[in-house]
Amino acid sequence: MKSITLGAALILATVGSCIAAEGPGAHFIENWDLNGDGAVTAEEARERRGNVFASFDANDDGFLDAEEYVLFDEARAQDQAENEPKGLGKGARNPANGMRLEVNDTDGDGKVSEAEFLDNAASWIEMIDRNGDGVVTVADFGPRG
């Protein structure tokens, strides 16, 4: 069994810039914008979700089961608490909602296969994409103006 503590920390740590961005959605963009253009596409999300999946599939069986999901949920909650402005991340479009077991378990078998997790990337981006332009930027976060 691999150690997921270090892997989880690495996956949820900043990927892009060494300078910490601030404001609603900045941490999400830092972690998911693989090419550094300030926008997260479904393709980037799919690639990154593959990394996340590999980090939390502790027994390497190709599934995230309920026990592995507990660790995944805890790591995401801690990351959000440490990196998102207070009071944010509670709405329906919160990216964390699209990572939940019940959202990704599309066949209802109580666990999430790698294919299920990756295939949900596009709908996850669509859920977060408040302005409907097909990508997620910081404009898709924060209070509606």
Image (cartoon, rainbow, N blue to C red):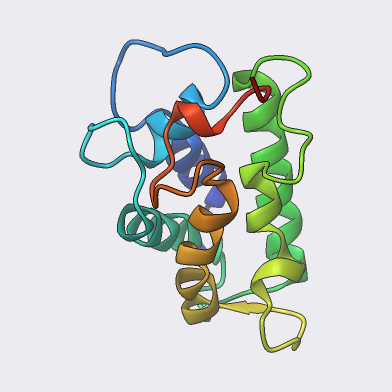
Q: Nearer the viewer, residue 11 or 30?
A: 30
Residue 29 image offset from top left, x and y in percent: 42, 32
User: Does residue 31 lie above or below 143 as drawn?
Assistant: below
Report the quarter where the N terminus lies: bottom right
Give the side of residue 89 with respect to residue 12, left or right.
right
Residue 137 image offset from top left, x and y in percent: 42, 33
Residue visible at 47% across and 63% down in the picture: 121
Residue 99 image offset from top left, x and y in percent: 64, 56
Report the quarter where the C terminus lies: top right
Residue 86 image offset from top left, x and y in percent: 74, 15
Q: Quadrant of residue 63?
A: bottom right
Q: Nearer the viewer, residue 52 or 20?
A: 20
Give the side of residue 35 with respect to residue 31, left or right.
left
User: Does residue 31 lie above or below 73 as drawn?
Assistant: above
Q: Nearer the viewer, residue 45 or 132?
A: 132
Residue visible at 57% across and 21% down in the picture: 24
Q: Quadrant of residue 42?
A: bottom left
User: Does residue 63 lie above or below 22 as drawn?
Assistant: below
User: Does residue 114 lie above or below 27 as drawn?
Assistant: below
How many numbered tags mark residues here?
Answer: 0
Residue visible at 66% across and 82% down in the picture: 106
